[in-house]
Amino acid sequence: MAPLWPWLGAFLAALPVALAGHGDPIAQKYIVEFANSQTSSASFLSTLNKHGIQATLNHDLSFDLFHGGSFTLEDDKNEAAVIKQISSWAAVKKVSPVRELEQPKSEVSSVAHNSHARRSASSHGFRRRDTAGHESNDYPHIMTGVDKLRQEGYLGTGIKVVVIDTGIDYTHPALGGCFGKGCLVEFGWNFLDNTTDPYEGHSGHGTHTSGLIAAQSNPYGFTGVAPNVTLGHYKILGKQKVTYSTDIITAAFKRAYEDKVDIISASFGSYKGWSDEPFGQTVQRLAEAGIPSFIAAGNDGASGVFLGSNGIDNPAGVGIGSFNNKYSPLLLTGATYHTSNGTQQFGWQPAASHDFKNGTYGLYPGSLNTSIVNDSCEPWTGTHPDLSDKIVLIRYGGCSSRVQQANAIQAGAKNILIYLNEPGTYEFSAVNDSLSGYGMLSAQTGEKFVNLVASGADVTLNMTSAEFAKTIFINETNPQSGGQISEFTQWGPSNEILPSTAVSGVGGFMLSTWPLPEGGYAIESGTSMATPYVAGCVALLMEARGKGKVSPAEIKALLSTTANPNVFHDGVTASPFLGSVAQQGGGLIDAYKFVHATTKFNISTISFNDTQHIAPAYIRINNTDSSPRVYTIGHVGAATVFTLDGNSTIPKENKLGNFVNRTSQGASLEFSSSSVSVPAGESAVLKVTATPPKGLDSRLIPVYSGYITFNGTSSSDSFSVPYLGVATDMRNVTIMDTKDGNNVLTDSSTKEPVKADHQFIVSNQNATSEQANTTYPVFAPILSMGTDLLLVGVKSAKGGPILLISEQTALARTVDGISTAPTVTSWQGQLANGSYVPEGNYTMIVRALKIFGDRHSSKGYETIRSVNFGITYAPLEDN
């Protein structure tokens, strides 16, 4: 079949430009992979200059596993033509755009924040109080079996782990207190200023993740998973830099190889869901060289299904989801409360401003109902005492805290404590300037105070300014979501129906180290925390079995098949059926079984793909033990989740307590045998045939999943292989919907849809900046699902070929209904080759490649045609 646009066939054939990536492309920056090791970055830069192409070298990325570099082109007028020229050279294997990524947004619950806490952290002199009655604050280790490995003496000794993050405060006593040979943090690199020093004293994320791997003993009674590892840190982010690029990531992985690390922990990501890109390829090549990479799945669980994160949509990457700690540790500002039964201590979280003045305050709850869902969301009515000398207690929820504050202030409140409707506390700053004092309590403390008042007790609070009060530690139970899948864990699968999350670690409500200038310790939640936790467990496996004895592919399969899946949880309520593999992967890591398992599987998770590409799967079971094994084969279905809700073609967003639409109706599986016997030192193969769930609305894109169980004679000899699939033909899934005014041409000035024959006066092509009184057509795509190729072109009303304006690759679906800037086409007459069209009337044509669509056939694309419009160039003298 002829190509859909006359130029496209030649374009695709001539260009080895990567048609996939992760993150939005950065203008004029490219990673060039060389055809062989004979070409160096310096010699390639010289070749560019000889051809009249002005460029600068950003990073030399060549090492044993990859030959290439990243470059910035200085000419932004003819970028596409230059890339086409470069790609035709024999010395070039592939050209890929450099893409911008960002760190997953983890939530800081509380920080030891004041000057007293900073002094105490450096001297290990904190006060601590454990209201839960638990002796150890290493409860995550009990959840995962790390505690049993500790009893066997495994601490990660001799294993070299690098964390790629925001930098580390290695002066922290719980992180060894020094940097270099003989220190806990022995090596590192700062990619922000190209030095060997990865120190960071303000941005806490990297210090926190590092502590989860290797924290030493401290006053709070927790330690890292593998405190005896040799730790390294590569700083790619910092307080002033919150995004980074794929060439820096590739450079960091190159350094990891050259530093001969055993394990990479990377708590970063962005959602794209396409697998073939330099970062993903580097992850794969390092895995083939024996170095596994553990990458955070992301924290956009509220944004729905099909948000596979970068790096883990490549089969070699190990994506990590999160489970919540069964306890909710809190680092709070100390205060006391008094009743007729005496005085007791409590903790509160201060706002960024509006500290309490030292003094004693009466307590007045806005409601005596601890389950109220709209406390102070309406103006107060009825009588109440003078509130000027009291602290008003309000339950969070039902409306914004600003509304709650305003209504309490109108009733006379000067000081407010808000208590949460979920575990923990968090940092906040939205405070009405009319208030004197404002702070936050945990749900348990707030409910306790309300119940005391409701019982008739006279409760007074003795507050000390947060600047001078002592930090206290409280370890509360977490009955709402403890031990459950963290609702923030990002959902897969990838656009290509590849599993995203392989296994989950403990990442919710995690106590760890924090930079000393910022307090020394903090509680943070995110897949960023679960990732180093799992990396630490892998260090224990390497210590137990020996480095190089278990390949990265085997490690990934072991992690997934030995894990413990849990029920679906929406952040508030547990369901009676298992949670989706698309979110939790194999389930919560079982570190003890992971380290000691003698049965191995050749696959971590099965993808049965969509209904048009479904095929049987073959599982190879390898018995490395000296005794034979017999396994009974079974099947436990998990939640089938609907990507769409029927009201929109954009995946449904999830809200706490009202998560993705789901059903327990799942696939049926057929096995080649009901049991498998595997002699010692040998293997066996099981064939699995899946039939997608029937009777479901395929237009809602049902994602089904479950677990194939292998039950031996004991629980320690039982395993499960996760699987997932999609009960629809993905080629029929809508990519660009024109409903609700989406995906239409708009006017840059009015932002309104363009009517037929609208005339634009655009800036002159020779103008040095945008001219006054000009407007231009804008196309801002809203992508219901990801597309591997988005083509924007124009066609003259007089006829002729479609002329390319832009082509973009590996795009994720739209999140929050907003087009990202790089996908927006703001057209002022210039084509991709740098030339300008003549004045006249045109139609803009946008084509998005369908998932699994044939990029060489018009049937493989969705097409949108705009109304006819005209462009005229403004006279240059008007500039």
Image (spheres, rainbow, N blue to C red):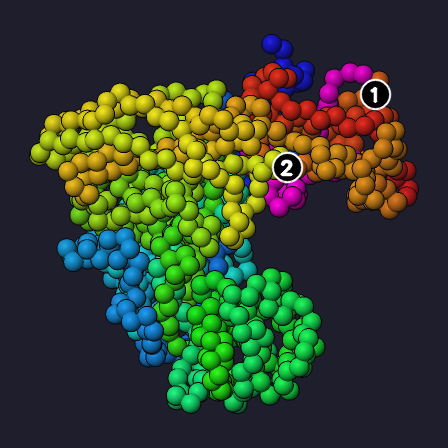
Q: Give the class, few, some or many, for how many residues have Cα within 10 Å of label 2's Cα (few <14, many ≥20).
A: few
Amino acid type, mark 2: Ser
Task: Give whichever of 15, 826 is nearer the camera.
Answer: 826
Position above or below: 206 against 89 = below
According to the picture, the residue beneath numbered tag 2 turns out to be 648
According to the picture, the residue beneath numbered tag 1 turns out to be 797
Inspect the magenta stretch and tell me whether residue 173 lies in it: no
**Residue 360 appears at what percent x and percent y?**
52, 89
**Residue 140 vs residue 269: left or right?**
left
**Residue 104 appears at what percent x and percent y?**
49, 51
Q: CA distance from mark 2 to mark 1?
A: 33 Å
Residue at image point 37% right, 24% down: 690
Q: State if disc 1 and disc 2 touch (CB < 8 Å).
A: no
**Residue 40 appears at what percent x and percent y?**
45, 34
Residue at image point 69% right, 71% down: 379
Is residue 260 at least partly visible in the picture?
no
Per the rendered image, the range of residues in magenta is 799-828
Residue 498 falls in image quadrant:
top left
Amino acid type, mark 1: Ala
